[in-house]
Image (cartoon, coloured by chain):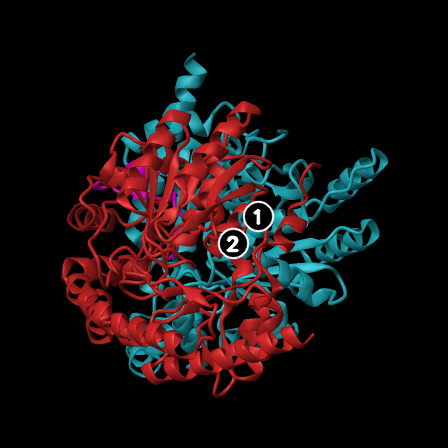
Chain colours: A cyan, B red
Amino acid sequence: MPYTFSNLIEGARPSEIRELLKYASQPGMISFGGGMPNPSSFAIEDIKQIVNDVLTVSWKYALQYGNTGGLPELREEISRMLMETEGFAADPQEIIVTSGSQQGLYALPKILANPGDIIISEAPTYIGAISSFNVNGIRTIGIPMDEFGIKTDLLEKTLEDLKRSGKKPRYIYVIPNFHNPAGYTLSLERRKHLLELSSKYGIPIVEDNPYGEIRFSGEKVPSLKKLDPTAEVTYLGTFSKVMTPGLRIGYLVSSTEVVRKVNLLKQAVALATDTLSEYIALEYLKRGIMKKQVPKTITLYRKKRDIMLSSLEECFPEGSTWSRPDGGMFIWAEVDKSIDTTAMITKALEKKVAYVSGSSFFPDGSKRNNMRLNFTFSEDDQIKEGIMRLGEVISSEMKLVKAA
Amino acid sequence: MPYTFSNLIEGARPSEIRELLKYASQPGMISFGGGMPNPSSFAIEDIKQIVNDVLTVSWKYALQYGNTGGLPELREEISRMLMETEGFAADPQEIIVTSGSQQGLYALPKILANPGDIIISEAPTYIGAISSFNVNGIRTIGIPMDEFGIKTDLLEKTLEDLKRSGKKPRYIYVIPNFHNPAGYTLSLERRKHLLELSSKYGIPIVEDNPYGEIRFSGEKVPSLKKLDPTAEVTYLGTFSKVMTPGLRIGYLVSSTEVVRKVNLLKQAVALATDTLSEYIALEYLKRGIMKKQVPKTITLYRKKRDIMLSSLEECFPEGSTWSRPDGGMFIWAEVDKSIDTTAMITKALEKKVAYVSGSSFFPDGSKRNNMRLNFTFSEDDQIKEGIMRLGEVISSEMKLVKAA
């Protein structure tokens, strides 16, 4: 056999993450490690009311097996929402509800590629995408980013090189808004260039947009799917950051052909999504809670981002740099080249502060001196305190390295 | 590439099922087709109370991302429940919560086998298992059943033949209690024989037990996992039939090594299970609702089984036979050999009665004259009426065939 799935699974996620999780719940620990929304962003009273109403009126359906593709009314509401927020038309038949975005991320390499095929991503990229590529036996080529997102000139060069050697990547995976982990937003110019390249080389795009609605500053940049409705773009969205992540509701928008295949795969992987959660999401949209809640979440998180940015300015040693995200949940910091942030994590945990080291986000685990800092979960004063601790850890690590 | 996953997915589920789903919601349709619990079996008032309490006390956790492996307290409660109901000890570390049983069914061929490998199942077997084998590129060998379950003498012969040709199946998949679709229960004698064969040939067993608690008559037969705690048995359970199926909570019990691999795969496939549903399941167990509700469900379903059995006696033409299940949700009927139940389904749908034809449940789609009849979802009078309609459809089909 060319691929031992059992072994592919082994490599799916860096063991460091598991290490981190063990420590993250220790008393006094300040964790910038996870990707968790702040519970203050949950519209708990509205959700309570919704659940009570659903279990009074629709319980026979809300507790029964649902459709694999998702509640039809929910797909209609998502279609309406996408027109309103993203400005593109998606027929409910082109939408499938997924059990979190991750289910879509898992399905796509399985449907659009075969083990051994190449998929292109940004470098760094989302750790859950790396997992899904790994367990599906995909060869991932990562294209570097800067503050304007994926470097499309390098992408073009890579595509040309691959073409010359007779290889065709199955798709290009990007997170255009407030990138996880990098915090960068893909510029309009590069979005257009990316779409041109997709068309020129005949390679579909997978546009992952979990944070798009959570913008603190700057102007909205149109999604790839809106910019070119004729392009082969599969769009991934989720309720995790705009409702709650515990109710596992995501969605995938693509051609009816791709949606049909995701549906067939979903029948084998999990059957329907949690029906009660689908009903909650439906009412969350229908009652306008989403529209009411998102601005509150933005205000909450903007302040946290600002606190983290000014704390970094104050506490991180010279030679460090970081992204200044216009939205989302993460800041991406680069520290002195002498430092291996993976090796440093034990020392940070001793000082009761956690982060995820940058190497976890590179398909080849290459870069050693980055870290991802989540600013949404911690309380405001914890952010200041945590960044101070982390600054001290970095400074003393730099001294150690220089002394050696 | 040896396997085109995209094509494997295509074959995952018979198109007939989709056809059926289109019709199942028509007005006046009596459907014995689905595998749905009756909403009257849902403890709606208790569930409402639980959700309200959870969203008052634990909302910060119940709406947040959960552990991939499942809520630790829920795994402890499942461990306690298994000791009480099945009489075997399972450490919480040997349990992983899955998003419905189907997630476990999908994970196992991926973890324990590679594409092209052989897995042995009963014939017929659960359609969701066939899907998961198909999309994972597994070669399934089905062993015939009779009213005492899988014919272990034929299994032995198959294992011996395979061994002689140098082939080793990765595991044996069985549904020992109130089989889906066949309704049969594996006898104690055959359970022992199956365990002997597993040990002799070094082949693990996957024991799928979704209906075990729903017994109407006869004596409980010990689970394979209880009969031989030293055997390599992975046990699959679910809350779908004893709580509600819309809250997608299943569990898998195995060695810590298998559980660890399922966990790693789950990180790529879906991340955590729906947290709110986990909290509901936890309280459902802790408050003793499960214990209170299951006897009510048994009373409800026993009557439905009895009505279906006597209606079959009354309305099905001579030459038909059917299983007499001691529990679960399904009766398996065999009609005159001249009839192809797959071809007949359109006529049944015209008469507003639905079933799933038997061929869907055979890994090779071979047998043509069976049907699976669900007796739990329909109302009592619908069962009578539906079986009458179906009897007429079969009789007129027999006449047609004979006239031809």
In the displayed image of the protein, which residue is found farthest to the top?
A404
Determine the residue positioned at 53% across, 72% down: B21
Left or right side of B114 for A391: left
Q: Is residue A133 visible?
A: yes
Give how far apart the Cα atoms at labels 2 and 1 are. Answer: 9 Å
Residue with the mark numbered 2? A268
Dot 2 crowding, Cα within 10 Å, few <14, some 14–19, many 20+: many
The magenta span reads A21-37
Dot 1 crowding, Cα within 10 Å, few <14, some 14–19, many 20+: many
Residue A56 in percent (x, y) is at 29, 82
The quarter in which the C terminus of chain A is drawn is top left
In the displayed image of the protein, which residue is found farthest to the bottom?
B27
- Front label number (2 vs 1): 1
Chain bearing tag 2 is A
Which amino acid, mark 1? Asn
Quarter assignment of residue A144: top right
Residue B189 in percent (x, y) is at 28, 40
Quarter assignment of residue A209: bottom right
Determine the residue positioned at 28% across, 76% down: B40
Q: Which of A331 and A94 is in front in this view?
A: A94
Determine contact: label 2, label 1, CB under 8 Å.
Answer: yes
What is the secondary structure assignment of the residue under circle 1? Answer: helix
Residue A271 in percent (x, y) is at 47, 60
Residue with the mark numbered 1? B134
Q: Can residue A391 be seen in this view?
A: no
Position above or below: B175 against B298: above
Name the dominant secondary structure of the magenta segment: loop
Chain bearing tag 1 is B
